[in-house]
Image (cartoon, rainbow, N blue to C red):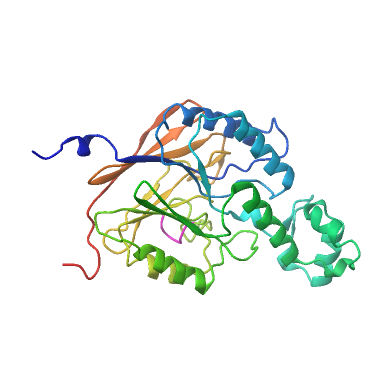
Amino acid sequence: MENKNKYVQPIVSFQVITDTHVREQADHIHNRHLEKALEDIATYSHGSSGIMHVGDVTDRGLQQEYQELQRILEAQGDSLPSILYTVGNHDIGAMVWGDPPLNLTTMTGQEVGEVLGHSTDMGQVEAEDIEKPKESITIDALWQKRLNDFTAITGMNGSYHDHWINGYHYIFLGTEQPHPKDCDMSAEQLQWLEAKLSEQAAADQPIFVFLHQPLMDTVAGSMKEQGWYGVNQDAALKDVLSRYPQAILFSGHTHWQLQAQRTMYEGGEQMPTMFNASSVAYLWTDEDEHLDGSESLHVDVYHDRVVVKGRDHVTGSWIEGAKYTVHYPVKVKGSN
């Protein structure tokens, strides 16, 4: 007799959080929202394969913010599953967060050097390069410092990396340029993605992909007129993903609340299913308005389906109407 339990109990579960925007002030609302979210997740994540963070871990990519992140995580002790991280534009973007913020990509090399030569954003890099003229301190130096800080604290291996956990493949993508808002992926990363997606690929086996910025005209906030899509290689990435409709792509960046339209993008047989993972720090609405709140996704993987549910961390409850099912196996191009 067939084992009916495999249809009732999930094989694996994991959580998806994004846009925590940790600040250096311990009592900042973003930090308090993250503390509450992690406390809430700890109540229902026993046996989880991990918490998958979809980027904008910090608000400004500063060392003080990563120190706050460590404090928050250490306060949870052993109550949480391990966390894997996606790099976000706020973590590595070429911005100096003064008043007003400065977009370094719009400035000349000399202007960049002058700004960074006086900026605490450079931290240790500034001290090491103290003998160099200010104009020699570059955007590349800031990018390397912020990427190094990100990898040192999170333990991730660069902008893109993958992991096999409990028999399922988790693939993390990310920018390779310090664009203040968008994701810029190399041809090498796209080739790497194609190779990783093909590993043990099967129509009945979901592949989980994480990228901070959504693809254009897919999930909430990513419509062309909304302006919060953000992959420079949008068409090329869609081309790769189109060959693996069994994949599920989770993105952040937009902060769109889970009760908005298009939390789930149904790719059908042409593209992977995609989900907007909302935000832990604060939310955004279809009316293009800021909203106080803190949300994330919980994922249960069954023998024949993947179920994704939205969680409100302020109330500690499941979000009504934010429950989605992706059925397997899927129809894969070229298969009979």
Horizontal and vertical percent for residue 274? Answer: 38, 53
Quick one: 317 or 229, which is closer to the camera? 317
On the question of residue 259 being in view, the answer is no
Quadrant in which residue 21 is drawn: top right
Residue 280 relative to residue 25: left or right: left
Nearer-the-camera pick, 284 or 63: 63
The secondary structure that most of the magenta stretch takes on is: loop
Answer with the quarter of the image where residue 69 lies.
top right
Q: Which image quarter is the N terminus in?
A: top left
Using residue 12 as the reference point, say whether residue 236 is left or right of it.
Answer: right
Instruction: Give percent across and percent down for residue 112.
Output: 80, 66
Residue at left offset 45%, top offset 41%: 50
In this view, the residue farthest toward the bottom is 187
The question of residue 17 being in magenta is answered with: no
Q: Which residue lies at the image location 82% right of the left edge and 51% below the top edge?
A: 120
x and y percentages locating residue 188 in the rendered image: 51, 72
Q: Position of residue 262 (x, y in %)?
A: 39, 49
Q: Look at 22% across and 46% down and name the residue there.
A: 304
Asked whether the viewer can see residue 320, the reply is yes
Task: Tell whether position 215 is magenta.
Answer: yes
Q: In this picture, which residue range is highlighted in magenta?
A: 214-218
